[in-house]
Amino acid sequence: MAKQKTIPELEAEKAGKERKLLQLQHKKQQLENRAAYYEKGDRRKRAHHLITRGAAIESVASLTKVLTETEFYTFAEKHSP
């Protein structure tokens, strides 16, 4: 038959398991933060791409600065290949 553990032994074991649980929760949070960082990076790259393209269009066709959104899309459709 297995030897029964004393209360101090059980408390020490509990403290060790709680510490391990906190470490694993922290590791999980780190991984979630890393995933969010990379996802956010992709959005930033896309936003940068769209902004630079829009600025290029405005520099070539300065008329687009004063157009409404509907007028801009009409203009873009007429001038697309």
Image: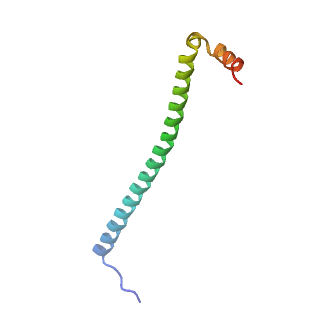
Left or right? Give the position of 31 relative to 72. left
What's the colour scheme? rainbow
Pick the front one: 33 or 57: 57
Q: Residue at x 70, y 20 (%)?
A: 77
The N terminus lies in which quarter of the figure? bottom left
Q: Residue at x 53, y 32 (%)?
A: 49
Q: Residue at x 37, y 60 (%)?
A: 23
Against 25, residue 1 (above or below) is below
Against 52, residue 64 (above or below) is above
Give the image location of residue 5, x and y in percent.
Answer: 33, 79
Give the image location of residue 71, x and y in percent.
Answer: 66, 13
Give the image location of residue 65, x and y in percent.
Answer: 55, 13
Residue 9 image-quadrant placement: bottom left
The C terminus lies in which quarter of the figure? top right
Pick the front one: 43 or 26: 43
Left or right? Give the position of 7 relative to 33. left
Pick the front one: 2 or 64: 64
Q: Residue furthest bottom?
A: 1
Q: Residue furthest left?
A: 8
